Image (spheres, grey):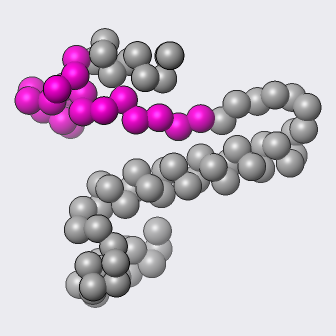
Amino acid sequence: MERFVRDAQEGVHTERGWPSTAYGVSKTGLTTLTRIMARNLLKERPGEEILCNACCPGWVRTDMAGPNATKSPDEGAVTPVA
């Protein structure tokens, strides 16, 4: 993540293979962090059956996504619950 920030600040992120949106990179970072945390839980607390999960509910009508998003909050909530 630090490399993306540095490359973006220098204006060379796209030529170095990064996407053009910080949002997409942040989602990749979050998914990677979740995988690291899950691996650490397995190692540090074996046998406790702790589930560490990440999910994407899709484009949900919120203050951030706006009114044109395709899913209602109830529809987006199905993803982490299912």
Q: Is residue 13 above or below residue 69?
A: below
Q: Is residue 2 above or below residue 71?
A: below
Q: Is residue 59 above or below residue 41?
A: above
Residue that sits furthest to the right in the current view: 47
Task: Give the camera-side residue of 74 and 62.
Answer: 74
Please state the horizontal and vertical placement of residue 66, each as a whole percent of the image: 12, 32
Residue that sits furthest to the top in the current view: 74
> Number of numbered discs present?
0
Could you say which quadrant of the image residue 13 lies in?
Answer: bottom left
Q: Is residue 33 above or below residue 51?
A: below
Q: Main secondary structure of the magenta part?
A: loop
Please state the horizontal and vertical placement of residue 76, each as a whole percent of the image: 33, 21
Task: Look at the image and tell me whether residue 45 can be seen.
Answer: yes
Task: Look at the image and tell me whether residue 9 can be seen.
Answer: no
Q: Residue at x 38, y 18 (%)?
A: 77
Reply yes or no: does residue 56 show up in magenta: yes
Please state the horizontal and vertical placement of residue 21, each as a whole percent of the image: 24, 62
Reply yes or no: does residue 49 show up in magenta: no
Q: Which residues are magenta?
A: 53-72
Please state the horizontal and vertical placement of residue 10, each as a whole percent of the image: 28, 87
Q: Residue at x 22, y 17 (%)?
A: 72
Q: Residue at x 34, y 78 (%)?
A: 17
